[in-house]
Image: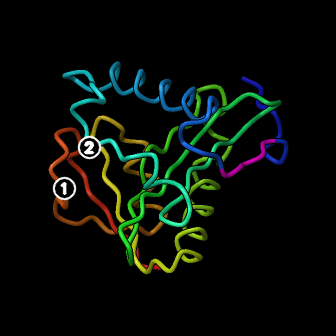
């Protein structure tokens, strides 16, 4: 499979309610519904409010290739700490380091917003995500929320 060069993929700060953000989020939810053994229903998840992922509380990023959204990631602000949410990369652009680029931008945004700690949750049905977070220096921690879907929890000091 041929990919566009990664430097041709722009990452922009967007409102999580914008059309490109919603396209990414809906593709993400569809993928979770296929991959999770019991499916996925976003209404059962602790879905962050859009305002929690916009400045000055947080951010939402969308990566675009040739004006087509291909990846996203959100940062939900909790004051001095932030929660990484909705990291998704289109299957057509996986293997290009987009998730790593998105996570680096999230960490920079978190620092800029005065956060000193990031947390995230994921599901063991997404082994590539779990492996990426471990490789990137995230530490596994006990459950920190009551969302019914995640079963693996991480944090990283900034």
Q: Dot 1: what SS?
A: loop
Say whether marks 1 and 2 touch (CB < 8 Å). yes
Find out whether residue 12 is within the magenta segment.
Answer: yes
Image position, residue 41 (x, y; %): 27, 25
Find out whether residue 143 is within the magenta segment.
Answer: no
Magenta-tinted stretch: 9-13
Identified at 55% across, 77% down, the residue is 111
Instruction: Tell me the crowding category of disc 2: few under 14, some 14 to 19, or many 20 or more residues within 10 angstroms, Cα based.
Output: few
Instruction: Tell me the crowding category of disc 1: few under 14, some 14 to 19, or many 20 or more residues within 10 angstroms, Cα based.
Output: few
Which circle's residue, 1 or 2, is located before the other in the chain? 2
Q: Is residue 74 or residue 141 the one in the foreground?
A: 74
Q: Is residue 57 or residue 112 the one in the foreground?
A: 57
Quadrant of the frame with the N terminus: top right
Q: Which residue is mark 2?
A: 46
Cα–Cα gap, marks 1 and 2 = 9 Å
Image position, residue 48 (x, y; %): 36, 47
Image position, residue 106 (x, y; %): 56, 62
Identified at 45% across, 46% down, the residue is 50
Image position, residue 140 (x, y; %): 27, 64
Q: Is residue 100 or residue 27 the one in the foreground?
A: 27
Q: Which residue is mark 1?
A: 145
Side of 137 where 147 appears, left or right: left
Identified at 48% across, 25% down, the residue is 26
């Amino acid at each position: 499979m041929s990919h566009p060069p990664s430097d041709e993929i722009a990452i922009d700060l967007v409102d999580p309610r914008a059309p490109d953000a919603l396209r990414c989020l809906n593709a993400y939810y569809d993928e979770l519904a296929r991959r999770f053994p019991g499916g996925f229903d976003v209404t059962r998840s602790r879905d962050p409010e859009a305002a929690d992922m916009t400045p000055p509380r947080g951010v939402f990023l969308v990566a675009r290739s040739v004006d087509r959204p291909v990846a996203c990631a959100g940062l939900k602000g909790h004051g001095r700490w932030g929660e990484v949410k909705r990291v998704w990369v289109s299957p057509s652009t996986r293997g290009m380091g987009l998730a790593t680029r998105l996570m680096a931008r999230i960490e920079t945004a978190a620092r800029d917003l005065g956060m000193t700690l990031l947390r995230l949750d994921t599901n063991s049905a997404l082994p590539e995500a779990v492996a990426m977070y471990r490789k990137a220096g995230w530490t596994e921690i006990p459950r920190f929320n009551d969302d019914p879907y995640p079963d693996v929890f991480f944090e990283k000091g900034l």
